[in-house]
Image (cartoon, grey):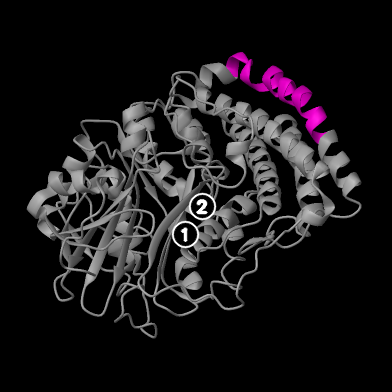
């Protein structure tokens, strides 16, 4: 970390930021994707308020915490919803013996959960945080697993008193009908092992606290233990594990390829783009089917219809990748192999699916979105206003259903997206209904992208079909290089922060999960409504707990 200010051209806008922040900047620690300003732990809120209100950085995309030999460090990765390529990082170092930093929660609501995770796993405390407690591990857990002094041999005990039945006599108020209700963690409507602690006043939801961590698998630590070149890529499939594997793989691929300055062949970019959009279609089909199950409580028809169509996509992806779920198809610098042979059959099979898709989407509108009961359950429930969605860091269909026109495929182009004709879908309804319509329309846009990719792949000269760049067998990026890169996954912005230390393994690997940020907004959407509305709102977020907990 440098201690003096470095001059950067005005064209980058960095000099304007230096003038805005003034003497609150104590150093520079630039990342490959963004300028990074080092500030004191007591100036965090002042700096972030200025960057949000005066410089327009209204999106706190990610918060990364890590420990060095001489300090702890929190990094706030800031972007603009209007232009995510305009990025800046705020680096907050603290002393190792007193790792206390001012909370960013009053500026960005999304920092609530991000800072709780940093406290839980790394051990940094955040002054003025409204609810600083563990989020992934039990409250009785001893130590912080990502800190250098963590004792892995130490036994962990979760005492019964910490998790006793909350319905005790002293919880009952004789003057009201308030009741504590546990939803999950094993109820099908929680979309995984999610525990929603809910307080009811009569039939009205007055408080919601999502309790996560039941599926925490230390994915970041596992990636930090793997080599860039070969051992990390299989892990992303296991984050959002319901059909979105190639989208997850692309998040890591984009980060390491930018970090190591690897240029992916154009032909491989087309294959990546096609595969990613097939994954998006499959993921949205599953989202529609499970949401209908939440709202109707009816299993056989709509749920099985969507699974039928998802299965066709899974067959195509299996032909392409050799796997049905955990694809492991992307490689650093490209993809594992070309289209399956005979390629004409693969292209024809994919085209047949695309030709049948419009009729199937119309069928879903007939069965689902035009249904009076479905509309009654979804319209004007789970309302999430645009500015609230932004403050919580919501992205993907959750944000676009609230009119937030933000899509990294268009706004921070990668792959082959900027060479194709397609539209970003937004809805102004801000409710559960708008989010469903948004996903259904995105299926149609994804089909347009796949169709164009097939046209390109079909006509691509045979002697120019390069599927991988020439990548060194062992990748060792420069020491202390840092980068944050993200892609538009099925659920929203899936980002990766990596810091290299000159070896073939990352010193820090941080996963920015869209589901993690989107789920934070559930209380905003549910308080003041009824329990069935809470279930519908949760379903409309389309969370996967493997990605929330990581």
Q: Mark number for residue 545?
A: 2
Task: Give the x, y percent position of residue 428.
Answer: 45, 20
Pick the residue in front: 176 or 131.
131
Say if 150 sits above or below 108 in the image: below
Q: Which residue is mark 1?
A: 214
Is residue 36 among what the camera can see?
A: yes
Q: Does 261 sit left or right of 323 as displayed?
A: left
* Magenta segment includes 372: yes
Sequence-wise, the earlier of marks 2 and 1 is: 1
Q: CA distance from mark 2 to mark 1?
A: 8 Å
Which residue is the extreme one toward the bottom? Answer: 153
Which residue is the extreme one toward the left? Answer: 23
Predominant SS along the magenta part: helix
Pick the residue in front: 283 or 46.
46
Q: Does 312 sit left or right of 387 as displayed?
A: right
CB atoms at circles 2 and 1 under 8 Å apart?
yes
Q: Quadrant of the N terminus?
A: bottom left
Q: Of helix, strand and loop, which one carries label 1?
A: loop
Q: Does 360 sit left or right of 157 as displayed?
A: right
* Magenta segment includes 120: no
Location of residue 264 by image quarter: bottom right
Location of residue 94 by image quarter: bottom left
Pick the residue in front: 234 or 273.
273
Say if 479 sits above or below 327 in the image: below
Q: Mark number for residue 484?
A: none
CA neighbours of label 1 inside 10 A, class few (<14), some (14 to 19), many (20+) = some
Disc 2 vs disc 1: which is toward the camera?
Answer: 2
Is residue 202 among what the camera can see?
A: no
Q: Which residues lie in the magenta part?
A: 353-373
């Amino acid at each position: 970390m440098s201690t003096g200010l470095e001059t950067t051209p005005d064209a980058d806008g960095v000099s304007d930021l230096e003038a805005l922040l003034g003497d609150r900047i104590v150093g520079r620690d630039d990342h490959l994707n963004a300028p990074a300003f080092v500030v004191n732990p007591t100036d965090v809120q002042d700096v972030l308020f200025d960057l949000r209100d005066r410089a327009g950085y209204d999106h706190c995309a990610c918060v990364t915490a890590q420990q060095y030999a001489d300090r702890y460090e929190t990094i706030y990765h800031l972007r603009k919803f209007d232009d995510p390529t305009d990025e800046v990082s705020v680096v907050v170092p603290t002393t190792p013996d007193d790792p206390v930093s001012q909370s960013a929660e009053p500026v960005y609501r999304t920092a609530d959960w991000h800072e709780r995770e940093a406290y839980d796993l790394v051990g940094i405390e955040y002054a003025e945080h409204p609810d600083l407690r563990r989020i992934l591990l039990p409250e009785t857990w001893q130590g912080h697993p990502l800190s250098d002094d963590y004792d892995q041999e130490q036994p962990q005990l979760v005492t019964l008193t910490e998790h006793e039945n909350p319905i005790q006599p002293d919880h009952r108020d004789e003057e009201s009908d308030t009741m504590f209700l546990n939803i999950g963690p094993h109820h099908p409507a929680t979309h995984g092992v999610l525990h929603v602690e809910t307080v009811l006043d009569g039939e009205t939801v007055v408080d919601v606290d999502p309790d996560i961590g039941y599926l925490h698998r230390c994915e970041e630590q596992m990636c930090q233990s793997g080599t860039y070149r070969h051992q990390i890529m299989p892990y992303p499939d296991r984050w959002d594990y319901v059909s979105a594997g190639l989208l997850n793989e692309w998040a890591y691929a984009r980060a390491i390829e930018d970090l190591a300055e690897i240029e992916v062949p154009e032909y491989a970019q087309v294959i990546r783009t096609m595969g990613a959009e097939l994954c998006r279609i499959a993921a949205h089909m599953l989202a529609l089917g499970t949401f209908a199950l939440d709202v109707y409580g009816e299993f056989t028809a709509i749920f099985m219809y969507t699974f039928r169509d998802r299965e066709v996509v899974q067959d195509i992806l299996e032909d392409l990748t050799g796997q049905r779920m955990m694809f492991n198809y992307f490689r650093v610098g490209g993809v594992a192999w070309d289209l399956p042979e005979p390629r004409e059959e693969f292209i024809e099979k994919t085209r047949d699916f695309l030709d049948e898709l419009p009729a199937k989407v119309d069928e879903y509108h007939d069965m689902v979105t035009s249904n009076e009961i479905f509309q009654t359950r979804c319209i004007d429930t789970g309302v999430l206003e645009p500015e609230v969605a932004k403050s919580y860091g919501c992205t993907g269909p959750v944000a676009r259903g609230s009119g937030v026109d933000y899509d990294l495929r268009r706004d921070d182009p990668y792959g082959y997206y900027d060479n194709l004709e397609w539209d970003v879908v937004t809805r102004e309804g801000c409710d559960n209904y708008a989010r469903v319509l948004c996903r259904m329309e995105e299926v149609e846009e994804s089909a347009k992208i796949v169709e164009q990719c097939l046209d390109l792949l079909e006509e691509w000269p045979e002697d120019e079909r390069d599927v991988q760049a020439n990548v060194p067998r062992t990748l060792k990026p420069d020491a202390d290089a840092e980068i944050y890169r993200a892609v538009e996954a099925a659920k929203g912005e899936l980002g990766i922060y990596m810091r290299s230390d000159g070896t073939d393994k990352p010193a820090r690997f941080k996963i920015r999960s869209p589901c993690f940020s989107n789920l934070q907004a559930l209380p905003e959407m549910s308080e003041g409504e009824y329990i069935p509305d809470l279930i519908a709102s949760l379903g409309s977020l389309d969370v996967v707990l493997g990605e929330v907990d990581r």
